[in-house]
Image (cartoon, rainbow, N blue to C red):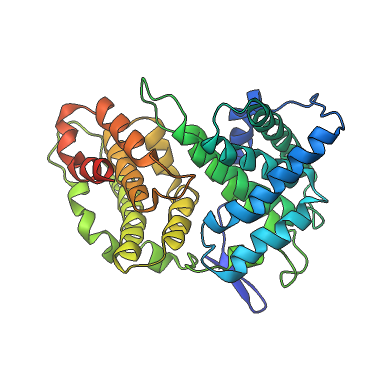
Amino acid sequence: MLTDYGQLSFPTFQIDNDAINLSFHLLEPAIASDIEIPESKARRKLELRLQHNFIANMCPTFSACHNVAVREAWSTDVPKVALEHDNLLYEMFAISAFHLLKSDPNDAELIAARQTYLSLSLHEQRKAVSRLDSRNADAVCLASSLILMDSFASLQDRALDPYLPPMEWLYMARGAGSLYGVALDRINNFKTSRIMAIAMAEPLLDDANVVFAESNRTGLLGLLSQEIIGEFWDKETKETYEKTLSYLGGVQIGIDRGEHPLATLRRMMAFALLAPKKFIQYVGEQRPRALVILAHFFALASNVKDIWWIGDIAQREVQGIWDVLPLEWHVMMRKPLATSRLA
Protein backbone atom coordinates (compact mmCIF):
# COMPACT_ATOMS: atom_id res chain seq x y z
CA MET A 1 0.00 0.00 0.00
CA LEU A 2 3.07 2.26 -0.15
CA THR A 3 4.19 4.29 -3.12
CA ASP A 4 7.82 5.31 -2.92
CA TYR A 5 9.07 8.57 -4.42
CA GLY A 6 12.70 8.86 -3.40
CA GLN A 7 12.62 9.61 0.32
CA LEU A 8 8.84 9.94 0.38
CA SER A 9 6.26 7.23 1.02
CA PHE A 10 2.55 7.76 1.48
CA PRO A 11 -0.66 5.77 1.24
CA THR A 12 -2.13 5.14 -2.18
CA PHE A 13 -5.79 4.74 -3.01
CA GLN A 14 -7.43 2.44 -5.51
CA ILE A 15 -8.25 4.38 -8.65
CA ASP A 16 -11.98 4.11 -9.15
CA ASN A 17 -13.17 6.22 -12.06
CA ASP A 18 -16.75 5.15 -11.40
CA ALA A 19 -16.48 6.63 -7.90
CA ILE A 20 -15.13 9.90 -9.29
CA ASN A 21 -17.93 10.17 -11.85
CA LEU A 22 -20.62 9.13 -9.39
CA SER A 23 -19.47 11.65 -6.79
CA PHE A 24 -19.93 14.47 -9.30
CA HIS A 25 -23.19 13.00 -10.62
CA LEU A 26 -24.70 13.04 -7.12
CA LEU A 27 -23.77 16.70 -6.76
CA GLU A 28 -24.93 17.68 -10.24
CA PRO A 29 -27.97 19.65 -8.96
CA ALA A 30 -25.57 21.88 -7.02
CA ILE A 31 -23.27 22.48 -10.00
CA ALA A 32 -24.07 25.49 -12.13
CA SER A 33 -21.97 26.99 -14.88
CA ASP A 34 -23.91 30.21 -15.41
CA ILE A 35 -23.51 31.82 -11.98
CA GLU A 36 -21.90 35.23 -12.07
CA ILE A 37 -20.86 37.29 -9.07
CA PRO A 38 -20.86 41.00 -9.92
CA GLU A 39 -17.75 42.88 -8.84
CA SER A 40 -18.60 45.21 -5.94
CA LYS A 41 -17.32 46.59 -2.68
CA ALA A 42 -19.72 44.27 -0.83
CA ARG A 43 -18.31 41.23 -2.62
CA ARG A 44 -14.72 42.20 -1.82
CA LYS A 45 -15.54 42.72 1.85
CA LEU A 46 -17.46 39.44 2.03
CA GLU A 47 -14.62 37.46 0.47
CA LEU A 48 -12.09 39.06 2.80
CA ARG A 49 -14.32 38.12 5.71
CA LEU A 50 -14.58 34.53 4.49
CA GLN A 51 -10.85 34.27 3.87
CA HIS A 52 -10.01 35.70 7.30
CA ASN A 53 -12.43 33.32 8.99
CA PHE A 54 -10.92 30.36 7.12
CA ILE A 55 -7.37 31.23 8.15
CA ALA A 56 -7.96 32.43 11.71
CA ASN A 57 -10.80 30.25 12.94
CA MET A 58 -11.20 27.18 10.76
CA CYS A 59 -7.74 25.84 9.94
CA PRO A 60 -6.96 24.92 13.57
CA THR A 61 -10.02 22.62 13.54
CA PHE A 62 -9.01 20.54 10.51
CA SER A 63 -7.92 16.94 10.93
CA ALA A 64 -4.22 16.49 11.82
CA CYS A 65 -3.80 20.25 12.46
CA HIS A 66 -2.31 19.45 15.84
CA ASN A 67 0.77 19.00 13.64
CA VAL A 68 2.33 22.44 13.15
CA ALA A 69 3.32 21.70 9.54
CA VAL A 70 -0.24 20.73 8.63
CA ARG A 71 -1.75 23.77 10.34
CA GLU A 72 0.69 26.07 8.55
CA ALA A 73 -0.03 24.38 5.23
CA TRP A 74 -3.76 25.05 5.58
CA SER A 75 -3.44 28.58 6.95
CA THR A 76 -0.51 29.84 4.85
CA ASP A 77 0.07 27.72 1.75
CA VAL A 78 -3.51 26.84 0.83
CA PRO A 79 -4.77 30.46 0.62
CA LYS A 80 -1.81 31.24 -1.66
CA VAL A 81 -2.55 28.29 -3.95
CA ALA A 82 -6.22 29.30 -3.98
CA LEU A 83 -5.37 32.67 -5.53
CA GLU A 84 -4.40 30.79 -8.71
CA HIS A 85 -7.08 28.06 -8.68
CA ASP A 86 -10.77 28.94 -8.47
CA ASN A 87 -11.86 25.41 -7.52
CA LEU A 88 -9.90 25.73 -4.28
CA LEU A 89 -10.69 29.41 -3.73
CA TYR A 90 -14.46 28.97 -4.06
CA GLU A 91 -14.56 25.88 -1.83
CA MET A 92 -12.57 27.81 0.77
CA PHE A 93 -15.24 30.52 0.68
CA ALA A 94 -18.09 27.97 0.68
CA ILE A 95 -16.96 26.06 3.75
CA SER A 96 -16.08 29.31 5.53
CA ALA A 97 -19.61 30.59 4.96
CA PHE A 98 -20.96 27.28 6.29
CA HIS A 99 -18.85 27.72 9.44
CA LEU A 100 -20.07 31.27 10.01
CA LEU A 101 -23.68 30.17 9.54
CA LYS A 102 -23.29 27.90 12.56
CA SER A 103 -23.16 31.06 14.69
CA ASP A 104 -25.63 33.10 12.65
CA PRO A 105 -27.95 30.72 10.74
CA ASN A 106 -30.31 33.47 9.55
CA ASP A 107 -27.69 35.70 7.90
CA ALA A 108 -29.08 36.13 4.38
CA GLU A 109 -25.74 37.24 2.92
CA LEU A 110 -23.99 34.14 4.27
CA ILE A 111 -26.79 31.83 3.10
CA ALA A 112 -26.47 33.21 -0.43
CA ALA A 113 -22.67 33.05 -0.28
CA ARG A 114 -22.75 29.45 0.86
CA GLN A 115 -24.99 28.36 -2.00
CA THR A 116 -23.18 30.40 -4.65
CA TYR A 117 -19.60 29.50 -3.76
CA LEU A 118 -20.39 25.82 -3.22
CA SER A 119 -21.93 25.60 -6.68
CA LEU A 120 -19.00 27.47 -8.23
CA SER A 121 -16.43 25.34 -6.43
CA LEU A 122 -17.96 22.09 -7.67
CA HIS A 123 -18.18 23.46 -11.20
CA GLU A 124 -14.55 24.56 -11.14
CA GLN A 125 -13.42 21.29 -9.53
CA ARG A 126 -15.02 19.30 -12.31
CA LYS A 127 -13.27 21.47 -14.90
CA ALA A 128 -9.95 21.09 -13.08
CA VAL A 129 -10.28 17.31 -12.95
CA SER A 130 -11.03 17.18 -16.67
CA ARG A 131 -7.66 18.85 -17.39
CA LEU A 132 -5.67 17.45 -14.50
CA ASP A 133 -1.91 17.86 -14.84
CA SER A 134 1.15 18.88 -12.80
CA ARG A 135 0.04 22.52 -12.77
CA ASN A 136 -3.23 21.97 -10.90
CA ALA A 137 -2.71 18.61 -9.15
CA ASP A 138 -2.00 20.26 -5.79
CA ALA A 139 -5.12 22.40 -6.01
CA VAL A 140 -7.30 19.43 -6.99
CA CYS A 141 -6.06 17.45 -3.97
CA LEU A 142 -6.58 20.36 -1.59
CA ALA A 143 -10.02 21.18 -2.97
CA SER A 144 -10.98 17.50 -2.70
CA SER A 145 -9.97 17.55 0.97
CA LEU A 146 -12.18 20.56 1.67
CA ILE A 147 -15.10 19.18 -0.34
CA LEU A 148 -14.86 15.91 1.58
CA MET A 149 -14.85 17.78 4.89
CA ASP A 150 -17.74 19.93 3.67
CA SER A 151 -19.82 16.90 2.69
CA PHE A 152 -19.25 15.28 6.09
CA ALA A 153 -20.10 18.49 7.96
CA SER A 154 -23.31 18.75 5.92
CA LEU A 155 -24.54 15.54 7.57
CA GLN A 156 -25.48 17.79 10.51
CA ASP A 157 -28.28 19.32 8.44
CA ARG A 158 -29.55 16.48 6.27
CA ALA A 159 -33.10 15.16 6.61
CA LEU A 160 -33.34 11.88 8.52
CA ASP A 161 -37.03 11.04 8.24
CA PRO A 162 -37.07 8.49 6.78
CA TYR A 163 -33.50 7.50 7.49
CA LEU A 164 -31.34 6.66 4.48
CA PRO A 165 -27.60 5.92 4.63
CA PRO A 166 -25.37 8.94 3.83
CA MET A 167 -24.37 7.65 0.43
CA GLU A 168 -23.59 11.10 -0.99
CA TRP A 169 -20.83 11.52 1.59
CA LEU A 170 -19.57 7.95 1.13
CA TYR A 171 -19.39 8.31 -2.65
CA MET A 172 -17.77 11.73 -2.31
CA ALA A 173 -15.12 10.13 -0.12
CA ARG A 174 -14.49 7.32 -2.58
CA GLY A 175 -14.23 9.85 -5.38
CA ALA A 176 -11.85 12.00 -3.34
CA GLY A 177 -9.62 9.01 -2.64
CA SER A 178 -9.46 8.15 -6.33
CA LEU A 179 -8.75 11.79 -7.23
CA TYR A 180 -5.88 11.76 -4.77
CA GLY A 181 -4.48 8.68 -6.45
CA VAL A 182 -4.72 10.27 -9.89
CA ALA A 183 -3.51 13.72 -8.84
CA LEU A 184 -0.50 12.52 -6.85
CA ASP A 185 0.77 10.81 -9.98
CA ARG A 186 0.69 14.20 -11.74
CA ILE A 187 2.84 16.03 -9.19
CA ASN A 188 6.36 16.65 -10.46
CA ASN A 189 8.14 17.75 -7.29
CA PHE A 190 6.87 16.19 -4.08
CA LYS A 191 9.27 18.19 -1.92
CA THR A 192 7.67 21.49 -2.94
CA SER A 193 4.11 20.23 -3.24
CA ARG A 194 1.70 21.87 -0.79
CA ILE A 195 -0.34 18.70 -0.32
CA MET A 196 2.58 16.67 1.02
CA ALA A 197 2.61 18.22 4.50
CA ILE A 198 -1.01 17.14 4.81
CA ALA A 199 -0.62 13.74 3.14
CA MET A 200 2.41 12.82 5.27
CA ALA A 201 0.97 13.97 8.61
CA GLU A 202 0.67 11.80 11.69
CA PRO A 203 -1.06 9.50 12.21
CA LEU A 204 0.16 7.84 9.03
CA LEU A 205 -2.29 5.39 7.54
CA ASP A 206 0.10 3.93 4.99
CA ASP A 207 0.62 0.41 6.34
CA ALA A 208 -2.28 -1.94 5.62
CA ASN A 209 -0.82 -4.50 8.02
CA VAL A 210 -1.29 -2.00 10.85
CA VAL A 211 -4.50 -0.29 9.73
CA PHE A 212 -6.30 -3.58 9.08
CA ALA A 213 -4.55 -5.76 11.66
CA GLU A 214 -6.64 -8.67 12.91
CA SER A 215 -5.82 -7.73 16.50
CA ASN A 216 -7.52 -4.33 16.03
CA ARG A 217 -10.98 -5.89 15.93
CA THR A 218 -10.64 -7.93 19.13
CA GLY A 219 -13.15 -5.75 20.96
CA LEU A 220 -15.63 -5.85 18.08
CA LEU A 221 -15.89 -9.56 17.42
CA GLY A 222 -19.47 -9.60 18.68
CA LEU A 223 -20.46 -7.73 15.52
CA LEU A 224 -19.51 -10.83 13.51
CA SER A 225 -21.95 -13.03 15.45
CA GLN A 226 -23.98 -15.43 13.31
CA GLU A 227 -26.88 -15.78 15.74
CA ILE A 228 -29.29 -13.86 13.51
CA ILE A 229 -30.77 -16.19 10.89
CA GLY A 230 -31.47 -15.31 7.28
CA GLU A 231 -28.52 -13.04 6.46
CA PHE A 232 -26.55 -13.73 3.30
CA TRP A 233 -23.04 -14.79 4.32
CA ASP A 234 -20.06 -15.99 2.31
CA LYS A 235 -16.28 -15.68 2.46
CA GLU A 236 -16.20 -12.29 0.71
CA THR A 237 -18.87 -10.88 3.01
CA LYS A 238 -17.06 -12.13 6.10
CA GLU A 239 -13.73 -10.68 4.96
CA THR A 240 -15.35 -7.35 4.09
CA TYR A 241 -16.81 -6.96 7.56
CA GLU A 242 -13.61 -8.17 9.25
CA LYS A 243 -11.50 -5.62 7.40
CA THR A 244 -13.94 -2.81 8.16
CA LEU A 245 -14.02 -3.70 11.85
CA SER A 246 -10.24 -3.82 11.96
CA TYR A 247 -10.16 -0.23 10.73
CA LEU A 248 -12.72 0.90 13.33
CA GLY A 249 -10.85 -0.97 16.03
CA GLY A 250 -7.70 0.91 15.07
CA VAL A 251 -9.52 4.21 15.54
CA GLN A 252 -10.69 3.09 18.99
CA ILE A 253 -7.16 2.02 19.94
CA GLY A 254 -5.91 5.49 19.09
CA ILE A 255 -8.63 7.05 21.25
CA ASP A 256 -7.85 4.71 24.14
CA ARG A 257 -4.18 5.69 23.93
CA GLY A 258 -5.15 9.32 24.40
CA GLU A 259 -4.13 10.58 20.98
CA HIS A 260 -5.04 14.13 20.03
CA PRO A 261 -8.69 14.57 18.90
CA LEU A 262 -7.50 15.96 15.57
CA ALA A 263 -5.52 12.76 15.05
CA THR A 264 -8.70 10.78 15.71
CA LEU A 265 -10.45 13.01 13.20
CA ARG A 266 -7.82 12.17 10.57
CA ARG A 267 -8.47 8.46 11.08
CA MET A 268 -12.21 9.00 10.85
CA MET A 269 -12.04 11.08 7.67
CA ALA A 270 -9.97 8.36 6.01
CA PHE A 271 -12.49 5.65 6.89
CA ALA A 272 -14.69 5.98 3.81
CA LEU A 273 -11.61 6.30 1.58
CA LEU A 274 -9.93 3.16 2.89
CA ALA A 275 -12.83 0.91 3.90
CA PRO A 276 -13.52 -2.00 1.54
CA LYS A 277 -15.52 -1.00 -1.52
CA LYS A 278 -17.87 -3.89 -0.81
CA PHE A 279 -18.70 -2.41 2.59
CA ILE A 280 -19.86 0.81 0.94
CA GLN A 281 -21.99 -1.32 -1.39
CA TYR A 282 -23.52 -3.19 1.57
CA VAL A 283 -24.38 0.10 3.26
CA GLY A 284 -26.06 1.28 0.06
CA GLU A 285 -28.07 -1.95 0.02
CA GLN A 286 -29.04 -1.22 3.64
CA ARG A 287 -27.87 -4.60 4.87
CA PRO A 288 -28.54 -4.58 8.63
CA ARG A 289 -25.04 -5.69 9.67
CA ALA A 290 -23.45 -2.99 7.49
CA LEU A 291 -25.70 -0.36 9.08
CA VAL A 292 -24.80 -1.60 12.56
CA ILE A 293 -21.10 -1.28 11.75
CA LEU A 294 -21.69 2.17 10.28
CA ALA A 295 -23.41 3.13 13.55
CA HIS A 296 -20.28 2.06 15.43
CA PHE A 297 -18.24 4.30 13.12
CA PHE A 298 -20.48 7.29 13.79
CA ALA A 299 -20.41 6.61 17.52
CA LEU A 300 -16.66 7.26 17.39
CA ALA A 301 -17.49 10.83 16.34
CA SER A 302 -18.77 11.38 19.90
CA ASN A 303 -15.11 11.72 20.87
CA VAL A 304 -14.68 14.77 18.64
CA LYS A 305 -18.16 16.31 18.89
CA ASP A 306 -16.77 19.65 20.13
CA ILE A 307 -15.25 20.29 16.70
CA TRP A 308 -17.69 22.51 14.82
CA TRP A 309 -17.97 20.37 11.69
CA ILE A 310 -18.75 17.22 13.70
CA GLY A 311 -21.27 18.44 16.27
CA ASP A 312 -24.25 16.13 16.81
CA ILE A 313 -23.64 13.92 13.76
CA ALA A 314 -23.01 10.87 15.98
CA GLN A 315 -26.32 11.14 17.83
CA ARG A 316 -28.33 11.88 14.67
CA GLU A 317 -26.91 9.09 12.52
CA VAL A 318 -26.88 6.41 15.23
CA GLN A 319 -30.49 7.16 16.19
CA GLY A 320 -31.50 7.11 12.53
CA ILE A 321 -29.93 3.69 12.03
CA TRP A 322 -31.59 2.39 15.20
CA ASP A 323 -34.98 3.54 13.93
CA VAL A 324 -34.78 1.59 10.64
CA LEU A 325 -33.07 -1.59 11.82
CA PRO A 326 -35.11 -4.77 12.30
CA LEU A 327 -35.67 -5.39 16.01
CA GLU A 328 -33.46 -8.47 16.10
CA TRP A 329 -30.42 -6.30 15.28
CA HIS A 330 -30.97 -3.84 18.13
CA VAL A 331 -28.90 -5.99 20.47
CA MET A 332 -25.82 -5.01 18.45
CA MET A 333 -26.67 -1.31 18.73
CA ARG A 334 -26.50 -0.90 22.50
CA LYS A 335 -22.96 0.43 22.64
CA PRO A 336 -23.17 3.04 19.83
CA LEU A 337 -26.60 4.14 21.01
CA ALA A 338 -25.39 4.62 24.61
CA THR A 339 -22.17 6.34 23.49
CA SER A 340 -23.90 8.79 21.17
CA ARG A 341 -26.65 9.65 23.66
CA LEU A 342 -24.14 10.34 26.42
CA ALA A 343 -22.08 12.63 24.20
Query: From the viewer's perspective, is 258 left or right of 30?
Result: left
Left-right relation of 144 to 162: right
Q: Which residue shows up at 16% across the image and 43% down it?
A: 226
Rendered location of residue 38, percent (x, y): 85, 28
The outermost residue toward the top is 162
Residue 297 in percent (x, y) is at: 34, 47
Q: Is residue 265 visible?
A: yes
Q: Is residue 338 placed above or below 316 in the rendered structure?
A: below
* Identity of the residue drawn at 63% across and 28% down: 111
Res 29 quadrant in image: top right
- Where residue 195 appears, as percent x and y from the top left, is 67, 61
Say which quarter of the image contains residue 97: top right
In the image: residue 331, left or right of residue 71:
left
Residue found at x 57% / y 50%? 177
Compared with 276, 38 (above or below) is above
Nearest to the observer: residue 77 or residue 135: 77
Q: Is residue 15 visible?
A: no
